[in-house]
Image (tube, rainbow, N blue to C red):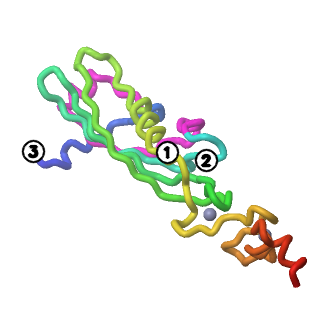
Amino acid sequence: MNENDLYQDYDVAPNLQFKTIDIIRMGGLKCSCVIEASYLDGLFEAPNRITKAAVELSFSVANSEILVLGKVQGQREVQCARCLKMTLQPFAEEFTESYSTKQEIIDIMYLVRQTIALSEEIRFLCKPDCKGLCPMCGQDLNVAPCKCQPENLSPFAALKGKFK
Ligand SMILES: [Zn+2]
Ligand SMILES: [Zn+2]
């Protein structure tokens, strides 16, 4: 059997719930679909969020188990930990899970949400060498340097004038 034969006209539910009986009847399933961003709300700490996502799935039936291999990819809008700018970044995560054929429903959305939630980094950076904001005046140092001279931050700065 050609691998492409597994791609069927299967209507994937928007909530990514699959009936185990359907998967068994088809002897497996390969499918892909777009996930509405509203299903992925609240996965990241605000203001970070998922703006776009799509999933590719491969179900295979073996004995009393259904094995699922999946890949979710899309775009996330995240805040830079240094300069606080929001940037769009692509993301892609793979996952694998097995289910008993006795289970009525295979809830892929739960799996996808879990996978994405675990992928959140503690500190996003807009670029690896982001210069961040000046702690004195708040100027974005990636755009231009500010007038706060580093020597003004030194505890000896105040003494300097006295010994002139
Ligand atoms: Zn930044
Ligand atoms: Zn400054």
Mark 1 residue's CB less than 8 Å from ligand 1: no
Amino acid type shown at disc 3: Met
Task: Give the percent coordinates (x, y) of residue 41.
Answer: 58, 37
Mark 3 or 2, nearer chain start: 3
In the picture, the disc for residue 120 is 1
The reply to whether discs 1 and 2 touch (Cβ–Cβ < 8 Å) is yes
Q: Residue at x 22, y 19 (%)?
A: 101
* Magenta-tinted stretch: 16-43
Q: Give the answer, above or below, for where 90 lies relative to 5.
A: below
In the picture, the disc for residue 48 is 2
Q: Residue at x 73, y 73 (%)?
A: 150
Amino acid type shown at disc 1: Glu
Task: Give the percent coordinates (x, y) of residue 14.
Answer: 47, 35
Q: Which is more toward the observer, 106 or 21?
A: 106
Q: Residues within 10 Å of mark 1 (few under 14, many from 20)?
A: some
- Which quarter of the rendered image does ligand 2 occupy? bottom right
Q: How much space separates mark 3 and mark 1, taking CA atoms?
A: 39 Å
Task: Give the percent coordinates (x, y) of residue 76.
Answer: 54, 52
Q: Which residue is mark 3?
A: 1
Q: How much space separates mark 1 and mark 2, taking CA atoms?
A: 9 Å
Q: Residues within 10 Å of mark 3 (few under 14, many from 20)?
A: few
Q: Quadrant of the N terminus?
A: top left
Q: Is residue 86 left or right of residue 71?
A: right
